Amino acid sequence: MSYKELADHLQSLGSKVVNHHEKLEGIPLAKTAESLEKAVLRFEKRLDDFLGGRGPGIQDLEELLKSPQAKAHLPLPGLNIISQKIFGELLEGDKPAAAKKEFFERVKKEQVGEKAVAIIKEFFFKAAQMPPPPEDKVSMQNELLRLGGLPDEELQYEFVHRLKSVAVLKKLANANSLPVSRNAKRGELVEKITHYARRAHANIAHRAP
């Protein structure tokens, strides 16, 4: 069926519904009409995206990147994690706004809007389910080992999303007896924790049979 034939069919169907709408009834017909409406809305959305030169999924992506979830869960390291999943590489931009623009334009260019939307939604869901930082000493020692085994971007994401407060970083450092000063700033804490987490994980990995 061509798009012209589809348009003619829809127009004929619309006229038939208008002419007989007062006597249409019954659950089977209503359920079929509901399914048809959903299909029409999906088609209309994709048609609007195509006619606007945006491609499928781009409008949804734009809305996602402006959403409260993006503000809460998508700092630069998170955007780089998603970029790696889609494109296999990090973004060139080193500032959030520039990186977000670069990501959006590349998704449009490579026509992977729907894939990007699916991955971002999954990312938001997992980010929202992340547990709070551990409290007891043993859990914090295990946390250091876990952090040491994360890829660089995922580790950075932990520091800007889940372990972003200085108080939490100091507790983590103290629980693992890391050599940090009492007045250590956030940057120093992140650097020390990263160094010793990597070293601790490497030692464990080296001992593993």
Image: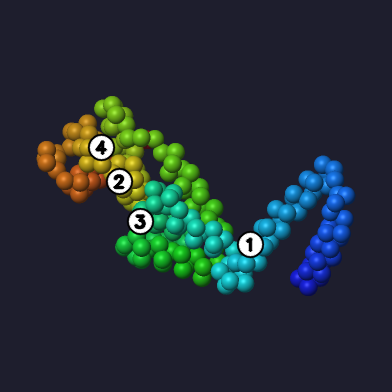
Q: Residue at x 44, y 57 (%)?
A: 66
Task: Residue 200 in the image: state x and y as whole percent.
Answer: 26, 39
Identified by mark 2, the residue type is Phe
Q: Between disc 1 and disc 3, whose residue precedes?
A: 1
Q: Quadrant of residue 92?
A: bottom left
Mark-to-mark CA distance, 2 and 4: 10 Å
Q: Between disc 3 and disc 4, whose residue precedes?
A: 3
- Checking the image for residue 3, the label placed there is none
Q: Between disc 4 and disc 1, whose residue precedes?
A: 1
The residue where tag 2 is placed is: 159
Q: Residue furthest front?
A: 22
163 or 59: nearer the eye?
Answer: 59
Quick check: marks 4 and 1 in contact, CB under 8 Å? no
Circle 4 or circle 1, nearest the eye:
1
Q: How are the colours assigned in the image?
A: rainbow
The residue where tag 1 is placed is: 45
Identified by mark 4, the residue type is Val
Q: Secondary structure at mark 3?
A: helix
Q: Quadrant of residue 208?
A: top left
On screen, 140 above or below 104?
above
Mark-to-mark CA distance, 3 and 2: 12 Å
Q: Between disc 2 and disc 4, whose residue precedes?
A: 2
Q: Secondary structure at mark 4?
A: helix
Mark-to-mark CA distance, 4 and 1: 45 Å
Q: Secondary structure at mark 2?
A: helix
Mark 4 neighbour class, 10 Å CA radius: few under 14, some 14 to 19, many 20 or more:
some
